[in-house]
Image: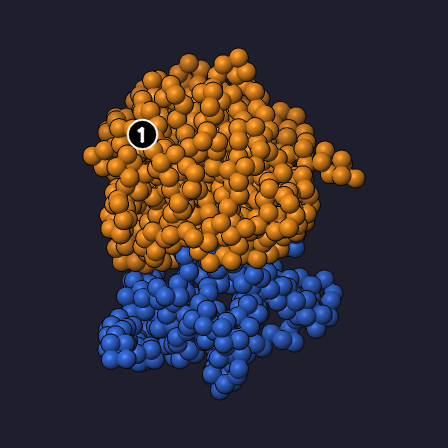
Amino acid sequence: MNTLVKLRYRFWPDKIFGELLQKSWMETAVPLLVLLAVIAFFSARIDTFISITSISDLLRQACELGFVVLGMSIVLIVGGIDLSVGSIYALSNLFALYCINVLGLGMPATVVATLVVGGLLGAVNGLLIGYFRMRAFLTTMVTLIVYKAANDMLNAKVAVQISANFPDAPAWDYLGAGTLLNVPVIVWIFGLVAIGGHVFLTRLRAGWHVLAIGGNRRSAYNTGLPVKRVVALSYAASGMFAAAGAIFYASRLASPGADTGKGLEIVVLTAAILGGIRLGGGKGSVMKALLGTLIVLLLTNGMLRMAMSAGASRVILATILLLAALLDIRWFKNRHKAVQELYVSPNYMELPPPQPTARDSGSPFALNDKLRDVETIGLGEVEAPEDVVLDSDNNLYCGNRHGDIVRFFAPDYKRHEVYAHIGGQPLGMAMCQDGTLLVCVGGMGLYRVNRDRSTEKVTDETNRSLLSIIDDSRLRLADDLDIAPDGRVFFSEATVRYEMHEWPTDSLEARGNGRIICYDPKTRKTTTVLRKLVFPNGIVMASDGQSLLFAESWACRISRYWFDGPQKGKVEVVINDLPGYPDNLNRASDGNYWLAIMGVRSPVFDLAMKRPAFRRRMSKKLPGDEWLAPNLNTGCIVKISEQGEVLDVLWDLGGENHPMITSMREHRGYLYIGGIHNNRIGRLRLADADAEFVDLKVSHA
Amino acid sequence: MQGSSIQTSHRSRAFGIFRGPGKAAGFDQLKIVSLLFVVIFVVYALLLPGFFTVGNLLTLMRTVAVLGILGLGMAIVVIGRGIDLSMIASLAVPSALVLMLAASGYSVFVAIGLGICMAIGIGILNGILVAYAEIPSLFTTLAVGIGIAGVGQIGLFDYEIVSWPPQLDVIAWIGRGSIAGLPYSVLAFLATAILVGIFLRGTRPGLFVYASGDNPGAARLTGIPLRPVMVMQYVMSSCIAFFAGLVLSASSASMDTRIFNLTWIYDVILVVVLGGIGLSGGRGGVANVIIGTLLIGTVMNGLTIMDVSFEMQNLVRGLVLLLAVLADSLINPRNEETAQQGDI
């Protein structure tokens, strides 16, 4: 039974679904699938649905429609809607034909004039909606009628004139019927515009403004964005795009028909919503607009080819429109929840039974009260000192949760100052002989504080692994570091799937989400050297200078990894049955190692580790604060040898002075103790320690 | 305490400037529109030959009666902070269905019963999509209207114009007869107005409509069944539209299902907005619809007498509506506290 469970969790890729769902391109994948389905459906029903001869005409139509959809998309993204595009399309068509046929303006002048007219017609919407704050839907619906009425009146006057004249403008004809490299001209132009639109929305400041205003109008206003102007301009742009579509329509058909653009707004709206551009704003891309356009065009063409009545295709279009809006709204409302539920993917983990800790068990971990006499430093003055480190002048440095590095002055550590402000929670630290401080900062990466207190980033990214779905190049939770004799910095990243404050969720997964990363100061390159570690935490160089010891918290084990020498690449488990969750590892003066145990294992959590289905159910059904989590209240300090023998254990049995421990640092006969949930730093006199020992690294960085 | 009370008074003063103290603003608009109506009426009567005649006034009233009935249905939805653009579809399609069923031999009761069922079905569809699926009402009702009109075109009717069958002549009086010179269609409008007035002001569901339109979140918190109330609004509006359709087809002896393509729905919105029922919901009542209807009817009647072309009339109506919506958005600005993101 257990083997089955193990195999299932070893080989069934649960986490892939959650990670895929989190990708923003997934929302574009859905309309793509719909498009393929539409093509497949009609190709099966109609013999020559897509053929070489029809495809050129189809592309021309698609691009004409595509222009209008692009305009509508911008308006939708900014949080509005533009129903007047159909009438603007019709008026622009009429205007362009009048310019070219009757006035004989020539191609460039006609194009520019028509674009301006379209932009102006759209700007009326923009003025009313952006500056007078009228409702987009009603306003554009009314301008739809007004423009339509104007179009009808003008059409009656100029249609005969237009039909009577034949323009002599080859450039104009080229626009409508010409090809470049066998591809219609319009496709080239539309392609350029689409790429420009993509760059605008994703790379340019103005495009970000559009997205921000659509996402939350009030916040955008509060951050100082020109909301009114951007909204107004987006309607002008929509009008201009409609005019662009109309120019090509006019040059292709040269028809001033009274029905031009009738019902276009519904088609365009369906295209945009189907493509996945959100009704209500804030989301959308050029790609989505393109996909939606193609879907709708193929649908309407297919329905036409299947000889459906106008009524039937309207019903189908309206139904699709409503369904797409429904899906979009429901999905957007529940997306966050769905992603969150699917993202957590617990794994099977079987831990060896822990070594006993009972006082009279005779175990090396037996409880004692050796930490009772810890002095406190900075009581109530520091918050969350995960690690402590001392310099050659005996000054003490620790991080706090406000993102500072605090320095306590020797010899009495009564006075303190903010040594440097980094901005993220400092975790593991290492002091170099020259006074340079290297810090792992949660959520930020590896940082350096120079002697002159200037801080600089050492590295915040590593190589992207080839097959991972989530982006694992960014450092999410750099945890502890040590420096090899040749200057390379090895540091652990506890998890690539969660942020620092989400560590309890990572513990629930019990999967190898973490890794060890190496930064080489000579090449300034960062590379991942060891993957799939279960919350790797403390790191310390071993005595041979070719290997390091590292702790994996949720796996309750210490391993040794050779990064150089004849055994390069080898990983060997040193201890695998710790009674608690190991945290930082540091050197002791006698050549052994100090290990912090941040919390003690409980039978319930150990059992839960073997029941991934239970943990998954828990993560779905219960709010996060009611989940099981590793206990981080009571821990101890352990002295271990390189071979994994437990030499000494220090507990605070009464829990009075220093029960919570995440790190310790030996310095000149004292042990300094940090704890991430503490408001103090502990200091313990070591009886038989080398009074001159300092834990300083050789700096090459 | 001190500070907070000062703040509250600031707030209420600020709101007073922009929104007016609730009812007073609506009342003022009602007065203004009434005055406007009287002025236009007098000007027309003095300047337009043939306007102030019994025949023309009866025509005027007959033409606006149906518009007024539709306006009453729309008013219910708009007060509940929605809008129903599918009203013309639910005017045309169910009543054309009744005509067709009666013509093909069903009894009058069965035919009308099925028509009502269809109207209720349209209302429920709208209501569920708006209330439960949370699609914006403008969007929902636009698409549903198109869909219903399409259904009428494909499945139900052989011709686009369905004529009034003799079998239905027993109820033809609702659109044709007259009592003491007043056409029945006008009486139908008045009767609907009284019923809707009683519903809105005198019954619990009616007050719920006001409450949910004024502040949906607060209405829900106080325990009003917000979503069912919304569905009810749409059911009522489509039923009223169906009734208007019967009156219309009786008076013109046919139902033209292409009516959906016309811009009639904008007249209905115009009546409601111009009358002073704010689109942000929770304000106004039957009196506003009546005065709005009279105003629009008079203006349009005058334009017809002046022989203004259909397109020009559309243009004028559109511009007037634009001004009305603009004025509405200035007088009754959307309440940012209760407006929803993406409320288009």
- Nearest the eye: A315 or B181: A315
Residue A482, image x and y in percent? 41, 29
Which amino acid, mark 1?
Cys
Residue A343, image x and y in percent? 56, 43
- Nearest the eye: A286 or A236: A286
Please give the chain letter of the residue carrying mark 1: A
SS for callout 1: loop
At 45% from the left and 31% from the top, the residue drawn is A590
Give the quarter of the figure containing the C terminus of chain B: bottom left
Query: Vertical placement of A407 versus A46: above or below?
Result: below
| Left or right: A244, with B218 as reference point | left
| Left or right: A231, with A428 as reference point | left
Query: Vertical placement of B34 versus A38: above or below?
Result: below
| Left or right: A122, with A266 as reference point | left
Q: Is residue A192 visible to the viewer in this orientation of the structure?
A: yes
Assess disc 1: are there few (<14), some (14-19) or many (≥20) residues with their C-alpha within 10 Å of its C-alpha.
Answer: many
At 31% from the left and 25% from the top, the residue drawn is A699
Q: Quadrant location of residue A671?
A: top left
Residue A448, image x and y in percent? 30, 33
| Left or right: A272, with A378 as reference point | right
Query: Vertical placement of B230 versus A350: above or below?
Result: below
Give the quarter of the figure containing the N terminus of chain B: bottom left
Extreme residue in the front direction? A688
Q: Which chain is orange?
A: A
At 79% from the left and 39% from the top, the residue drawn is A1
Q: Which chain is blue?
A: B
Q: For mark 1, what is the residue?
A: A432
Query: Vertical placement of B104 versus B6: above or below?
Result: above
- Nearest the eye: A242 or A507: A507
- Nearest the eye: A646 or A458: A646
Residue A413, image x and y in percent? 28, 48
At 44% from the left and 15% from the top, the residue drawn is A182
